[in-house]
Image: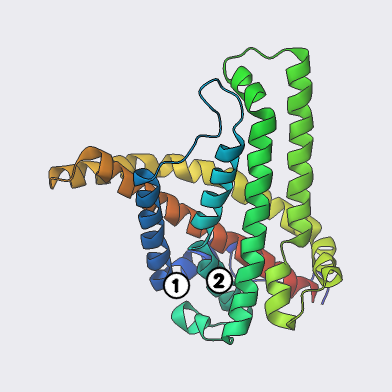
């Protein structure tokens, strides 16, 4: 069936919300692990990306990549069960048992590799453009800084385009048992506009969602403080939990989009 002819009965956000509820056990474990990781990071602070003089720090960059990868670990099961739910109809813990351990580990390795690539690219972007971004935040941008920021914007667009083309790897891997680059690119090319528009909508929607939950976070922190929990630990727990929920929702939405693209393109 062509990429234009395959209909779906529900909106992507409807599927995302339904999968969040159906996989609530996996989501809860992911949130709990994220809170524990955040607590570990709080008691074991590492070097900053910039040193005391404002210069980029290699050790800080490596530390940031490592922690990005650690934070990605709880999201991998969420991505896995979301793919299985859309492609095969099994949800929750039942989805975790759809394939043998080798298939699960193959999917996890691929997703962790993708997370590491994103972490490295994001860190490099910050190291190269952080000074210009700081200048822009203060309104002091000269011509050379504006040019560099323009180059950075183009680079970010190219990386996003590459993500659109290759992001169906998980669906292709689960459905065909193979991970040939050509098969993945076929899905990306056939459904490029479909993927590009919807993934861009997710990217633009997440900051809005984060802003919407801020008042709720404040209320939850106030409740925890009223029960005797100190303000700093309460804020750490609540912010980590809400960030994990938003991250899980984003992973579910992206998984639904790429799986639907595979179904349209097959």
Residue 168, compared with residue 214, is above or below; it is below
- Does residue 6 appear in the picture of this structure? no
Dot 2 crowding, Cα within 10 Å, few <14, some 14–19, many 20+: many
Q: Looking at the rendering, which quadrant does residue 86 occupy?
A: bottom right
**At x 72% / y 68%, what residue is drawn?**
169
Residue 234 visible, this orientation: yes
Q: How is the image coloured?
A: rainbow
- Determine whether 46 is above or below 197 in the image: above
Q: Are marks 2 and 1 in contact (CB under 8 Å)?
A: yes
**Camera-nearest residue between 218 and 51:** 51
> Tag 1 or tag 2, which sits nearer the N-term?
1
Residue ID at (79%, 45%): 158
Please name whichever residue, 60 or 149, is drawn nearer the observer in this view of the structure.
60
- Quarter containing the C terminus: bottom right
Look at the numbered disc 2 and give the secondary structure of its residue: helix
Of 231 and 124, the residue lying toward us: 124
Tell me the tag on residue 70.
none
85 relative to 186 in the view: left or right: left
Q: Dot 1: what SS?
A: loop
Vertical position of residue 52 compared to residue 122: above or below: above
> Which residue is drawn at the image coordinates 77% and 39% (left, top)?
155
Image position, residue 23 (x, y; %): 44, 72
Q: Which residue is mark 1?
A: 23
- In the picture, the quarter occupied by the N terminus is bottom right
Q: Which mark is residue 82?
A: 2
Quadrant housing residue 50:
top right
Measured as percent of width and height from the top left, residue 88 is found at 61, 83
For disc 1, the neighbor class at 10 Å (few under 14, some 14 to 19, many from 20) is many
Please state which of residues 105 and 226 is positioned toward the viewer in this rendering.
105
| Percent position of residue 128, x then y | 70, 31
Where is residue 219 drawn, in percent x and y?
26, 42
């Amino acid at each position: 069936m062509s990429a234009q002819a395959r209909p779906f009965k529900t909106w992507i956000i409807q599927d995302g919300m339904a999968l969040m509820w159906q996989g609530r056990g996996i989501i809860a474990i992911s949130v709990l692990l994220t809170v524990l990781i955040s607590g570990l990071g709080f008691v074991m602070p590492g070097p900053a990306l910039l040193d005391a003089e404002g210069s980029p720090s290699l050790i800080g960059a490596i530390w940031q990549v490592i922690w990005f990868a650690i934070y990605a670990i709880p999201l991998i099961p969420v991505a896995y069960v979301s793919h299985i739910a859309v492609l095969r109809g099994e949800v929750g813990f039942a989805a975790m048992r759809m394939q043998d351990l080798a298939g699960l580990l193959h999917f996890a390795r691929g997703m962790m590799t993708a997370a590491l690539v994103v972490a490295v690219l994001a860190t490099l972007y910050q190291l190269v453009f952080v000074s210009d971004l700081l200048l822009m935040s203060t309104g002091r941008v000269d011509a050379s800084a504006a040019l560099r920021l323009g180059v950075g914007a183009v680079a970010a667009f190219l990386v996003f385009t590459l993500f659109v083309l290759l992001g169906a790897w998980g669906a292709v891997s689960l459905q065909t048992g193979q991970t040939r680059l050509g098969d993945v690119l076929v899905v990306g090319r056939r459904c490029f506009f479909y993927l590009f528009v919807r993934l861009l909508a997710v990217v633009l929607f997440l900051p809005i969602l984060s802003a919407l939950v801020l008042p709720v976070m404040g209320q939850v922190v106030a409740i925890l403080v009223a029960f005797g929990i100190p303000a700093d630990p309460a804020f750490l727990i609540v912010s980590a939990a809400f960030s994990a929920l938003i991250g899980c929702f984003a992973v579910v939405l992206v998984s639904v989009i790429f799986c639907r693209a595979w179904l349209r393109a097959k």
